[in-house]
Amino acid sequence: MRKNMGDFTAAVITVSDKAYAGIRKDEGGPALISYLESKGLKVVYSEVVPDEAELIQKSIIEASRKGADLILTTGGTGFSVRDITPEATLSLIERQVPGITEYIRMKSAENNPYAVLSRAVCGIFERSIVLNLPGKPKGAVESLALVLDPLLHGIEILKGEVTEHA
């Protein structure tokens, strides 16, 4: 039986050189936080970092240390030279969860064929699930909405609270 949504914790990490430098307002992070809170999840950590692998990794590690069950990144998943969020994530996670990002790409491509260009990854880091999301607020929230329930079930399995699949 599913835990109360308030029993789940989350972190949101915005990866953006411009938002970090104050050139552009971070809209993706606040949109994700608002969505998570509307679903009853407690956000225990949020940060804006530049597109630098070491700082992305440091932020993911810190989010895990703060007890985030679900660590979401927004931004840095495209083809630009500075888009390195997937590589930074892959260097940390112990096991990949490719079905999550495959499903997001497949469903999102029904309305936006360019969604297949996302290089986002998902995986397990320590006792957390890390998911890369698009940088655009609408895309980030819509992508998360597609997979939030399976992610929460995965967290329950990861923590040993559920031993069978739904």
Image (cartoon, helix red, strand yellow):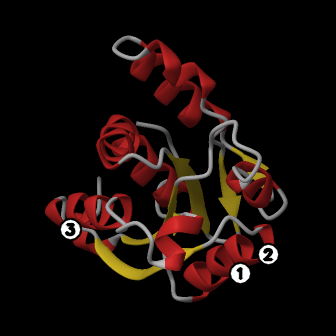
The residue that label 1 is drawn on is: 58
> Within 10 angstroms of label 1, few (less than 14), some, or many (20 or more) residues?
some
Task: Locate residue 27, reporting x and y percent.
Answer: 31, 61
Q: Which element type, helix, strand or loop, lies under badge 1?
A: helix
Alpha-carbon span between mark 2 and mark 3:
28 Å
Task: Locate residue 78, reporting x and y percent.
Answer: 63, 39
Q: Which residue lies most toward the right here?
A: 91
What amino acid is labelled 1 in the image?
Answer: Lys
Q: Which element type, helix, strand or loop, lies under badge 3?
A: helix
Q: Earlier in the sequence, mark 3 or mark 1?
A: 3
Mark 1–mark 2 contact, CB under 8 Å? yes
Mark 2–mark 3 contact, CB under 8 Å? no
Name which quarter of the figure residue 143 lies in: top left
What amino acid is labelled 2 in the image?
Answer: Glu
- Whether residue 163 appears in this view of the structure is no
Task: Give above or below for 30 relative to 97.
Answer: below
Residue at 73%, 73% (x, y): give it: 57
The residue that label 2 is drawn on is: 54
Which residue is nearer to you in this view: 124 or 164? 124
The residue that label 3 is drawn on is: 37
Task: Locate residue 109, reporting x and y percent.
Answer: 45, 15
The label nearer to you, 3 versus 1, is 1
Q: Is residue 76 left or right of residue 105?
A: right
Residue at 71%, 49% (x, y): give it: 86
> Which quadrant of the figure contains the C terminus?
top left
Task: Locate residue 159, reporting x and y percent.
Answer: 55, 67
Task: Give above or below for 3 relative to 116.
Answer: below
Q: Is residue 68 left or right of residue 123?
A: left
Q: Earlier in the sequence, mark 2 or mark 3?
A: 3
> Within 10 angstroms of label 2, few (less than 14), some, or many (20 or more) residues?
few
Alpha-carbon span between mark 3 and mark 1:
24 Å
